[in-house]
Image (tube, rainbow, N blue to C red):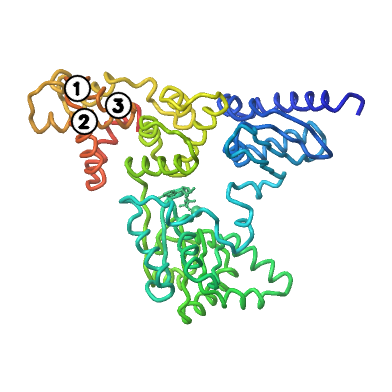
Protein backbone atom coordinates (compact mmCIF):
# COMPACT_ATOMS: atom_id res chain seq x y z
CA UNK A 1 0.00 0.00 0.00
CA UNK A 2 1.42 3.38 -0.95
CA UNK A 3 -0.40 5.65 1.44
CA UNK A 4 -0.19 5.49 5.22
CA UNK A 5 -2.53 3.10 7.03
CA UNK A 6 -4.58 5.88 8.63
CA UNK A 7 -5.24 7.53 5.32
CA UNK A 8 -6.09 4.21 3.77
CA UNK A 9 -8.51 3.46 6.48
CA UNK A 10 -10.24 6.75 6.03
CA UNK A 11 -10.56 6.30 2.27
CA UNK A 12 -11.75 2.78 2.67
CA UNK A 13 -14.35 3.79 5.20
CA UNK A 14 -15.56 6.75 3.18
CA UNK A 15 -16.08 4.58 0.14
CA UNK A 16 -17.89 2.01 2.20
CA UNK A 17 -20.02 4.76 3.73
CA UNK A 18 -21.13 5.90 0.31
CA UNK A 19 -22.17 2.42 -0.63
CA UNK A 20 -23.90 1.80 2.67
CA UNK A 21 -25.78 5.06 2.45
CA UNK A 22 -27.26 3.91 -0.82
CA UNK A 23 -28.40 0.61 0.65
CA UNK A 24 -29.90 1.72 3.93
CA UNK A 25 -32.73 3.97 4.96
CA UNK A 26 -31.62 7.42 6.01
CA UNK A 27 -32.80 6.70 9.52
CA UNK A 28 -30.75 3.52 9.82
CA UNK A 29 -27.75 5.07 8.21
CA UNK A 30 -27.76 8.14 10.45
CA UNK A 31 -28.47 6.24 13.61
CA UNK A 32 -26.24 3.23 13.26
CA UNK A 33 -23.63 3.59 10.55
CA UNK A 34 -22.61 7.24 10.64
CA UNK A 35 -21.60 7.08 14.32
CA UNK A 36 -19.19 4.19 13.74
CA UNK A 37 -15.68 5.46 14.10
CA UNK A 38 -13.02 3.38 12.37
CA UNK A 39 -10.01 3.10 14.62
CA UNK A 40 -7.44 0.83 13.11
CA UNK A 41 -6.83 -2.10 10.86
CA UNK A 42 -4.50 -4.94 11.38
CA UNK A 43 -4.40 -7.77 8.91
CA UNK A 44 -7.99 -8.40 7.95
CA UNK A 45 -9.37 -6.98 11.16
CA UNK A 46 -11.05 -3.64 11.22
CA UNK A 47 -11.87 -1.95 14.50
CA UNK A 48 -14.63 0.54 15.17
CA UNK A 49 -15.35 2.59 18.21
CA UNK A 50 -19.02 2.55 19.24
CA UNK A 51 -20.79 4.50 21.98
CA UNK A 52 -21.83 1.57 24.12
CA UNK A 53 -22.37 -2.12 24.40
CA UNK A 54 -26.00 -2.08 23.35
CA UNK A 55 -25.10 -0.12 20.27
CA UNK A 56 -22.50 -2.69 19.34
CA UNK A 57 -25.00 -5.48 19.81
CA UNK A 58 -27.61 -3.80 17.70
CA UNK A 59 -25.23 -3.03 14.86
CA UNK A 60 -23.87 -6.55 14.98
CA UNK A 61 -27.35 -8.07 14.97
CA UNK A 62 -28.70 -5.93 12.16
CA UNK A 63 -25.93 -4.65 9.98
CA UNK A 64 -22.96 -6.96 10.34
CA UNK A 65 -23.65 -8.74 7.09
CA UNK A 66 -24.05 -5.53 5.13
CA UNK A 67 -21.01 -3.95 6.73
CA UNK A 68 -18.84 -6.97 6.13
CA UNK A 69 -19.88 -7.35 2.52
CA UNK A 70 -19.65 -3.68 1.66
CA UNK A 71 -16.29 -3.18 3.31
CA UNK A 72 -15.22 -6.45 1.72
CA UNK A 73 -16.20 -5.14 -1.71
CA UNK A 74 -14.18 -1.99 -1.22
CA UNK A 75 -11.19 -3.61 0.46
CA UNK A 76 -11.03 -6.68 -1.73
CA UNK A 77 -11.01 -9.13 1.15
CA UNK A 78 -13.52 -10.30 3.68
CA UNK A 79 -12.82 -8.31 6.84
CA UNK A 80 -13.32 -9.29 10.42
CA UNK A 81 -15.06 -6.49 12.26
CA UNK A 82 -14.56 -5.58 15.88
CA UNK A 83 -16.56 -3.09 17.86
CA UNK A 84 -14.90 -1.45 20.79
CA UNK A 85 -16.99 0.34 23.33
CA UNK A 86 -16.34 3.75 24.63
CA UNK A 87 -14.64 3.36 28.02
CA UNK A 88 -17.12 5.87 29.44
CA UNK A 89 -19.89 3.36 28.91
CA UNK A 90 -20.64 1.70 32.26
CA UNK A 91 -20.96 -1.68 30.57
CA UNK A 92 -18.01 -0.81 28.38
CA UNK A 93 -15.89 -3.72 27.48
CA UNK A 94 -14.28 -5.04 24.46
CA UNK A 95 -16.98 -6.40 22.25
CA UNK A 96 -15.76 -8.54 19.47
CA UNK A 97 -17.63 -9.63 16.43
CA UNK A 98 -16.35 -11.81 13.73
CA UNK A 99 -17.35 -11.74 10.12
CA UNK A 100 -19.48 -14.77 10.78
CA UNK A 101 -23.04 -13.58 11.15
CA UNK A 102 -24.06 -16.72 13.00
CA UNK A 103 -21.87 -15.66 15.89
CA UNK A 104 -23.44 -12.28 16.31
CA UNK A 105 -26.29 -12.95 18.63
CA UNK A 106 -26.35 -10.96 21.78
CA UNK A 107 -26.46 -13.86 24.14
CA UNK A 108 -23.11 -15.12 25.29
CA UNK A 109 -21.23 -17.43 23.05
CA UNK A 110 -21.82 -20.60 25.03
CA UNK A 111 -25.45 -20.39 24.00
CA UNK A 112 -24.45 -20.82 20.41
CA UNK A 113 -23.06 -24.27 20.81
CA UNK A 114 -25.49 -26.89 19.63
CA UNK A 115 -27.74 -28.33 22.26
CA UNK A 116 -27.08 -25.71 24.92
CA UNK A 117 -29.75 -23.63 26.57
CA UNK A 118 -29.75 -19.93 25.77
CA UNK A 119 -28.43 -17.88 28.64
CA UNK A 120 -30.64 -15.16 29.98
CA UNK A 121 -33.96 -16.75 29.07
CA UNK A 122 -35.18 -17.52 32.58
CA UNK A 123 -38.48 -17.48 34.43
CA UNK A 124 -37.21 -14.61 36.59
CA UNK A 125 -37.07 -12.21 33.68
CA UNK A 126 -40.20 -13.43 31.94
CA UNK A 127 -42.96 -10.92 32.52
CA UNK A 128 -46.34 -12.53 33.02
CA UNK A 129 -49.50 -11.13 31.43
CA UNK A 130 -52.91 -12.46 30.42
CA UNK A 131 -51.42 -13.44 27.06
CA UNK A 132 -48.84 -15.87 28.40
CA UNK A 133 -50.15 -16.76 31.84
CA UNK A 134 -51.30 -20.21 30.90
CA UNK A 135 -48.18 -21.23 29.01
CA UNK A 136 -45.98 -19.88 31.77
CA UNK A 137 -47.91 -21.73 34.47
CA UNK A 138 -47.63 -24.97 32.49
CA UNK A 139 -43.93 -24.39 31.94
CA UNK A 140 -43.32 -23.76 35.62
CA UNK A 141 -45.26 -26.83 36.63
CA UNK A 142 -43.18 -28.93 34.28
CA UNK A 143 -39.98 -27.45 35.59
CA UNK A 144 -40.95 -28.79 39.02
CA UNK A 145 -41.95 -32.24 37.81
CA UNK A 146 -40.36 -32.98 34.47
CA UNK A 147 -41.65 -35.95 32.56
CA UNK A 148 -44.54 -36.79 34.83
CA UNK A 149 -47.08 -34.03 34.47
CA UNK A 150 -47.64 -33.01 30.89
CA UNK A 151 -45.70 -34.71 28.18
CA UNK A 152 -44.99 -33.25 25.74
CA UNK A 153 -45.50 -29.60 26.48
CA UNK A 154 -46.38 -27.96 23.18
CA UNK A 155 -46.32 -24.16 23.15
CA UNK A 156 -47.36 -22.23 20.11
CA UNK A 157 -47.89 -18.64 19.07
CA UNK A 158 -46.76 -15.90 16.70
CA UNK A 159 -43.22 -14.75 16.20
CA UNK A 160 -41.47 -12.84 18.98
CA UNK A 161 -44.00 -13.65 21.66
CA UNK A 162 -41.74 -15.53 24.07
CA UNK A 163 -41.87 -19.21 23.08
CA UNK A 164 -38.12 -19.67 22.90
CA UNK A 165 -37.70 -17.75 26.11
CA UNK A 166 -40.19 -19.91 28.01
CA UNK A 167 -38.87 -23.18 26.61
CA UNK A 168 -35.37 -22.26 27.75
CA UNK A 169 -36.65 -21.11 31.12
CA UNK A 170 -37.96 -24.62 31.79
CA UNK A 171 -34.56 -26.07 30.91
CA UNK A 172 -32.70 -23.63 33.14
CA UNK A 173 -35.02 -24.27 36.07
CA UNK A 174 -34.57 -28.02 35.74
CA UNK A 175 -30.79 -27.73 35.61
CA UNK A 176 -30.80 -25.35 38.53
CA UNK A 177 -32.67 -27.88 40.60
CA UNK A 178 -30.64 -30.82 39.37
CA UNK A 179 -27.29 -29.84 37.87
CA UNK A 180 -26.80 -33.38 36.60
CA UNK A 181 -29.93 -33.26 34.45
CA UNK A 182 -29.21 -33.79 30.77
CA UNK A 183 -31.07 -31.10 28.90
CA UNK A 184 -30.82 -30.49 25.20
CA UNK A 185 -32.19 -27.42 23.50
CA UNK A 186 -32.20 -27.42 19.72
CA UNK A 187 -33.89 -25.41 17.06
CA UNK A 188 -35.51 -27.63 14.47
CA UNK A 189 -32.78 -26.57 12.07
CA UNK A 190 -30.11 -27.34 14.62
CA UNK A 191 -31.65 -30.70 15.29
CA UNK A 192 -31.85 -31.50 11.60
CA UNK A 193 -28.30 -30.31 10.98
CA UNK A 194 -26.88 -32.37 13.79
CA UNK A 195 -28.70 -35.38 12.52
CA UNK A 196 -27.63 -34.86 8.93
CA UNK A 197 -24.05 -34.32 10.01
CA UNK A 198 -24.13 -37.45 12.15
CA UNK A 199 -25.53 -39.43 9.24
CA UNK A 200 -22.87 -38.15 6.86
CA UNK A 201 -20.17 -39.16 9.31
CA UNK A 202 -21.75 -42.53 9.90
CA UNK A 203 -22.45 -41.54 13.45
CA UNK A 204 -26.21 -41.53 13.32
CA UNK A 205 -26.44 -44.22 15.96
CA UNK A 206 -24.18 -42.28 18.27
CA UNK A 207 -26.35 -39.20 17.88
CA UNK A 208 -29.49 -41.18 18.52
CA UNK A 209 -28.01 -42.80 21.58
CA UNK A 210 -27.01 -39.44 22.94
CA UNK A 211 -30.46 -38.00 22.39
CA UNK A 212 -32.11 -41.03 23.89
CA UNK A 213 -30.19 -40.59 27.13
CA UNK A 214 -31.54 -37.10 27.63
CA UNK A 215 -33.75 -36.16 30.55
CA UNK A 216 -35.24 -33.21 28.73
CA UNK A 217 -35.40 -32.58 25.01
CA UNK A 218 -36.49 -29.15 23.81
CA UNK A 219 -37.07 -28.69 20.10
CA UNK A 220 -37.82 -25.12 19.09
CA UNK A 221 -39.94 -24.18 16.06
CA UNK A 222 -41.00 -27.66 15.02
CA UNK A 223 -42.90 -26.19 12.08
CA UNK A 224 -39.51 -26.15 10.34
CA UNK A 225 -39.45 -29.93 10.34
CA UNK A 226 -42.06 -29.60 7.64
CA UNK A 227 -41.15 -31.60 4.56
CA UNK A 228 -38.06 -33.13 6.15
CA UNK A 229 -39.11 -36.71 6.08
CA UNK A 230 -35.94 -38.32 7.24
CA UNK A 231 -35.62 -36.02 10.23
CA UNK A 232 -39.27 -36.56 11.08
CA UNK A 233 -38.77 -40.30 10.93
CA UNK A 234 -35.83 -40.15 13.33
CA UNK A 235 -37.61 -37.67 15.53
CA UNK A 236 -40.61 -39.97 15.72
CA UNK A 237 -38.48 -42.78 17.12
CA UNK A 238 -36.64 -40.50 19.51
CA UNK A 239 -39.95 -39.10 20.70
CA UNK A 240 -41.28 -42.57 21.43
CA UNK A 241 -38.21 -43.67 23.35
CA UNK A 242 -38.10 -40.55 25.49
CA UNK A 243 -41.83 -40.59 26.04
CA UNK A 244 -41.90 -44.19 27.15
CA UNK A 245 -39.12 -43.54 29.62
CA UNK A 246 -40.96 -40.59 31.07
CA UNK A 247 -38.45 -38.04 29.85
CA UNK A 248 -39.76 -34.55 29.31
CA UNK A 249 -40.26 -33.29 25.78
CA UNK A 250 -40.91 -29.62 25.11
CA UNK A 251 -41.85 -28.33 21.69
CA UNK A 252 -42.61 -24.92 20.29
CA UNK A 253 -44.20 -23.94 17.04
CA UNK A 254 -45.95 -21.08 15.31
CA UNK A 255 -49.10 -23.14 14.93
CA UNK A 256 -51.16 -25.60 16.94
CA UNK A 257 -50.41 -29.30 16.28
CA UNK A 258 -53.59 -29.76 14.26
CA UNK A 259 -52.69 -26.86 12.00
CA UNK A 260 -49.17 -27.95 11.13
CA UNK A 261 -48.52 -28.63 7.46
CA UNK A 262 -45.99 -31.02 6.02
CA UNK A 263 -45.55 -32.97 9.22
CA UNK A 264 -46.53 -36.60 9.46
CA UNK A 265 -49.86 -37.27 11.07
CA UNK A 266 -48.41 -39.62 13.66
CA UNK A 267 -46.05 -36.87 14.84
CA UNK A 268 -48.76 -34.23 14.94
CA UNK A 269 -50.87 -36.61 17.00
CA UNK A 270 -48.09 -37.09 19.48
CA UNK A 271 -47.48 -33.35 19.71
CA UNK A 272 -50.98 -33.05 21.11
CA UNK A 273 -50.72 -35.87 23.65
CA UNK A 274 -49.64 -33.75 26.57
CA UNK A 275 -50.49 -30.14 27.10
CA UNK A 276 -50.96 -27.65 24.29
CA UNK A 277 -50.60 -24.03 25.41
CA UNK A 278 -50.85 -20.98 23.24
CA UNK A 279 -49.18 -17.62 23.71
CA UNK A 280 -51.07 -14.61 22.49
CA UNK A 281 -49.91 -11.11 21.66
CA UNK A 282 -49.46 -9.04 24.83
CA UNK A 283 -51.86 -6.23 25.71
CA UNK A 284 -50.64 -2.68 26.28
CA UNK A 285 -50.10 -3.10 30.01
CA UNK A 286 -48.03 -6.24 29.53
CA UNK A 287 -46.01 -4.60 26.78
CA UNK A 288 -45.30 -1.74 29.09
CA UNK A 289 -44.33 -4.01 31.96
CA UNK A 290 -41.94 -5.89 29.66
CA UNK A 291 -40.36 -2.64 28.50
CA UNK A 292 -39.89 -1.40 32.02
CA UNK A 293 -38.39 -4.69 33.02
CA UNK A 294 -35.93 -4.65 30.09
CA UNK A 295 -34.99 -1.05 30.78
CA UNK A 296 -34.33 -1.85 34.42
CA UNK A 297 -32.25 -4.89 33.48
CA UNK A 298 -30.15 -2.89 31.07
CA UNK A 299 -29.81 0.12 33.35
CA UNK A 300 -31.70 2.40 30.99
CA UNK A 301 -33.51 5.38 32.49
CA UNK A 302 -36.84 5.09 30.74
CA UNK A 303 -39.38 7.76 31.63
CA UNK A 304 -42.89 6.44 32.22
CA UNK A 305 -44.33 8.49 29.38
CA UNK A 306 -41.86 7.07 26.91
CA UNK A 307 -42.57 3.54 28.10
CA UNK A 308 -46.22 4.19 27.54
CA UNK A 309 -45.61 5.67 24.14
CA UNK A 310 -43.57 2.70 22.94
CA UNK A 311 -46.03 0.23 24.42
CA UNK A 312 -48.97 1.83 22.65
CA UNK A 313 -47.19 2.30 19.39
CA UNK A 314 -45.50 -1.06 18.97
CA UNK A 315 -48.15 -3.70 19.26
CA UNK A 316 -46.73 -6.39 17.01
CA UNK A 317 -44.42 -8.43 19.19
CA UNK A 318 -41.87 -8.30 21.95
CA UNK A 319 -38.85 -8.50 19.74
CA UNK A 320 -39.97 -5.30 18.00
CA UNK A 321 -40.62 -3.77 21.38
CA UNK A 322 -37.06 -4.54 22.44
CA UNK A 323 -35.76 -3.19 19.15
CA UNK A 324 -37.52 0.11 19.71
CA UNK A 325 -36.10 0.40 23.21
CA UNK A 326 -32.59 -0.35 22.00
CA UNK A 327 -32.87 2.17 19.23
CA UNK A 328 -34.08 4.90 21.52
CA UNK A 329 -31.54 4.24 24.23
CA UNK A 330 -28.68 4.01 21.77
CA UNK A 331 -29.71 7.28 20.22
CA UNK A 332 -29.82 8.94 23.62
CA UNK A 333 -26.44 7.59 24.50
CA UNK A 334 -24.79 8.65 21.25
CA UNK A 335 -26.15 12.13 21.63
CA UNK A 336 -25.44 12.26 25.35
CA UNK A 337 -29.01 13.17 26.16
CA UNK A 338 -31.67 11.60 28.27
CA UNK A 339 -34.52 9.70 26.76
CA UNK A 340 -37.54 11.92 26.22
CA UNK A 341 -40.89 11.79 24.48
CA UNK A 342 -40.02 13.99 21.53
CA UNK A 343 -36.98 11.97 20.58
CA UNK A 344 -38.85 8.71 21.06
CA UNK A 345 -41.68 9.96 18.85
CA UNK A 346 -39.25 10.71 16.08
CA UNK A 347 -37.39 7.43 16.29
CA UNK A 348 -40.56 5.41 16.51
CA UNK A 349 -41.90 6.85 13.32
CA UNK A 350 -39.17 5.02 11.48
CA UNK A 351 -39.86 1.62 13.02
CA UNK A 352 -43.62 1.88 13.42
CA UNK A 353 -44.65 4.04 10.53
CA UNK A 354 -48.30 4.70 10.46
CA UNK A 355 -50.67 7.52 9.90
CA UNK A 356 -50.15 8.98 13.36
CA UNK A 357 -48.16 11.95 12.25
CA UNK A 358 -50.78 13.16 9.81
CA UNK A 359 -53.79 11.82 11.58
CA UNK A 360 -55.55 14.32 13.81
CA UNK A 361 -58.42 14.34 16.28
CA UNK A 362 -60.62 15.82 13.61
CA UNK A 363 -60.01 12.97 11.19
CA UNK A 364 -61.04 10.42 13.76
CA UNK A 365 -64.02 12.47 14.82
CA UNK A 366 -65.14 12.71 11.24
CA UNK A 367 -64.60 9.03 10.49
CA UNK A 368 -66.44 7.88 13.57
CA UNK A 369 -69.41 10.21 13.25
CA UNK A 370 -69.75 9.26 9.63
CA UNK A 371 -69.74 5.58 10.46
CA UNK A 372 -72.30 5.93 13.23
CA UNK A 373 -74.38 8.51 11.37
CA UNK A 374 -73.94 11.24 13.98
CA UNK A 375 -73.28 14.97 13.87
CA UNK A 376 -69.82 15.99 15.11
CA UNK A 377 -71.21 17.92 18.06
CA UNK A 378 -73.10 14.86 19.23
CA UNK A 379 -69.86 13.04 19.88
CA UNK A 380 -68.66 15.69 22.30
CA UNK A 381 -71.99 16.56 23.89
CA UNK A 382 -73.09 15.40 27.31
CA UNK A 383 -76.19 13.71 25.97
CA UNK A 384 -75.86 10.01 25.85
CA UNK A 385 -77.77 7.46 23.84
CA UNK A 386 -76.44 3.97 23.43
CA UNK A 387 -75.24 4.72 19.94
CA UNK A 388 -73.53 7.96 20.92
CA UNK A 389 -71.85 6.31 23.89
CA UNK A 390 -70.54 3.54 21.71
CA UNK A 391 -69.28 5.93 19.04
CA UNK A 392 -67.53 8.01 21.69
CA UNK A 393 -65.74 4.99 23.07
CA UNK A 394 -64.59 3.94 19.63
CA UNK A 395 -63.36 7.47 18.88
CA UNK A 396 -61.36 7.63 22.09
CA UNK A 397 -59.93 4.21 21.46
CA UNK A 398 -58.81 5.12 17.95
CA UNK A 399 -57.28 8.39 19.10
CA UNK A 400 -55.23 6.50 21.58
CA UNK A 401 -54.36 3.54 19.40
CA UNK A 402 -53.70 5.27 16.13
CA UNK A 403 -52.59 8.73 17.12
CA UNK A 404 -50.87 7.72 20.32
CA UNK A 405 -52.53 10.77 21.91
CA UNK A 406 -52.38 11.07 25.68
CA UNK A 407 -55.49 10.26 27.71
CA UNK A 408 -55.88 13.80 29.05
CA UNK A 409 -55.53 15.27 25.55
CA UNK A 410 -58.23 12.96 24.26
CA UNK A 411 -60.48 13.85 27.18
CA UNK A 412 -59.93 17.51 26.45
CA UNK A 413 -60.86 17.10 22.81
CA UNK A 414 -63.89 15.01 23.57
CA UNK A 415 -65.71 17.85 25.30
CA UNK A 416 -63.55 18.16 28.42
CA UNK A 417 -63.95 14.67 29.77
CA UNK A 418 -61.84 13.32 32.58
CA UNK A 419 -58.85 11.24 31.58
CA UNK A 420 -60.13 8.29 33.59
CA UNK A 421 -63.18 8.21 31.33
CA UNK A 422 -60.86 7.89 28.37
CA UNK A 423 -58.83 5.14 30.03
CA UNK A 424 -62.03 3.30 30.75
CA UNK A 425 -63.25 3.68 27.17
CA UNK A 426 -59.95 2.50 25.77
CA UNK A 427 -59.90 -0.59 27.93
CA UNK A 428 -63.54 -1.35 27.30
CA UNK A 429 -63.04 -1.31 23.53
CA UNK A 430 -59.84 -3.35 23.73
CA UNK A 431 -61.59 -5.92 25.87
CA UNK A 432 -64.68 -6.12 23.71
CA UNK A 433 -62.55 -6.47 20.59
CA UNK A 434 -61.00 -9.55 22.11
CA UNK A 435 -64.32 -11.07 23.06
CA UNK A 436 -66.49 -10.11 20.13
CA UNK A 437 -65.31 -10.69 16.58
CA UNK A 438 -68.09 -8.67 15.00
CA UNK A 439 -67.41 -5.71 17.19
CA UNK A 440 -63.70 -5.95 16.41
CA UNK A 441 -64.53 -6.03 12.74
CA UNK A 442 -66.58 -2.86 13.11
CA UNK A 443 -63.72 -1.07 14.90
CA UNK A 444 -61.25 -2.23 12.24
CA UNK A 445 -63.56 -1.01 9.52
CA UNK A 446 -63.79 2.46 11.03
CA UNK A 447 -60.01 2.51 11.48
CA UNK A 448 -59.48 1.52 7.86
CA UNK A 449 -61.88 4.18 6.65
CA UNK A 450 -59.76 6.79 8.43
CA UNK A 451 -56.68 5.33 6.81
CA UNK A 452 -55.17 3.42 9.70
CA UNK A 453 -56.09 -0.19 9.73
P1 LIG B 1 -40.51 -16.46 19.97
O1 LIG B 1 -39.65 -17.64 20.24
O2 LIG B 1 -41.94 -16.67 20.37
O3 LIG B 1 -40.40 -15.94 18.57
P2 LIG B 1 -38.74 -15.20 21.85
O4 LIG B 1 -38.86 -16.13 22.99
O5 LIG B 1 -37.51 -15.27 21.04
O6 LIG B 1 -40.02 -15.28 20.91
O7 LIG B 1 -38.94 -13.72 22.42
C1 LIG B 1 -38.52 -12.56 21.72
C2 LIG B 1 -37.87 -11.60 22.70
O8 LIG B 1 -38.84 -11.10 23.59
C3 LIG B 1 -36.82 -12.26 23.56
O9 LIG B 1 -35.75 -11.37 23.75
C4 LIG B 1 -37.52 -12.52 24.87
O10 LIG B 1 -36.64 -12.48 25.96
C5 LIG B 1 -38.51 -11.38 24.93
N1 LIG B 1 -39.74 -11.76 25.63
C6 LIG B 1 -40.79 -12.44 25.12
N2 LIG B 1 -41.76 -12.58 26.03
C7 LIG B 1 -41.31 -11.96 27.15
C8 LIG B 1 -41.87 -11.75 28.45
N3 LIG B 1 -43.10 -12.19 28.75
N4 LIG B 1 -41.12 -11.09 29.36
C9 LIG B 1 -39.90 -10.63 29.03
N5 LIG B 1 -39.32 -10.79 27.84
C10 LIG B 1 -40.01 -11.44 26.89
MG1 LIG C 1 -38.42 -18.57 18.91
Compared with 156, 388 (above or below) is above
Q: Which residue occupies 76% across, 36% down?
A: 46
**What secondary structure is found at the residue carrying circle 1?**
loop
What's the mark number on residue 18?
A: none
Task: Classify mark 2 as within 8 Å of ligand 1 or not, answering yes or no.
Answer: no
State the residue in front, 157 or 327.
327
Binning the other alpha carbons within 10 Å of mark 1 as few (below 14), some (14 to 19) or many (20 upward) gives many
Query: Which numbered disc flags the more N-terminal residue, 1 or 2?
Result: 1
**What residue did someone put label 1 on?**
414
Q: Which residue occupies 61% across, 64% down?
A: 192
Q: CA distance from mark 3 to mark 2?
A: 9 Å
Q: Are marks 1 and 2 in contact (CB under 8 Å)?
A: yes
Compared with 144, 5 (above or below) is above
| Number of numbered discs visible in the structure rendering | 3
**What secondary structure is found at the residue carrying circle 3?**
loop
Disc number lying in front (3 or 1): 3
**What residue did someone put label 3 on?**
406
**What secondary structure is found at the residue carrying circle 2?**
helix
Where residue 450 appears, x then y in whole percent?
A: 31, 26
State the residue in front, 289 or 358.
289
Q: Are marks 3 and 1 in contact (CB under 8 Å)?
A: no
Where residue 153 appears, x then y in whole percent?
A: 41, 67
Query: Which numbered disc flags the more N-terminal residue, 3 or 1?
Result: 3
Where residue 350 appears, x then y in whole percent?
A: 49, 28
Snapshot quadrant of residue 75:
top right
**What residue did someone put label 2 on?**
422
Name the quadrant of the N terminus: top right
Amino acid sequence: METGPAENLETLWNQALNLLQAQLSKQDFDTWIQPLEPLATSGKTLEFRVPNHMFATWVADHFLDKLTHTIGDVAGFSPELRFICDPADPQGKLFIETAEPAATKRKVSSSRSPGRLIDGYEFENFVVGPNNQFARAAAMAIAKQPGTLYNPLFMYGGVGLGKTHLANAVGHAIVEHDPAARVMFASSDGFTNQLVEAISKNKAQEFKNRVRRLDVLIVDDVQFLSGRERTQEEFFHIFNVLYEQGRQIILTSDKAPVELDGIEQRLCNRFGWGLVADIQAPDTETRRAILERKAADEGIALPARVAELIATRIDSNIRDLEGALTRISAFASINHTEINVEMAEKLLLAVAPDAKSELGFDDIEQGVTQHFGLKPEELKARRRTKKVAEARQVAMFLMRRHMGASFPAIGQFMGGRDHSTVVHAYQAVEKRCRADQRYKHMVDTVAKAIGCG
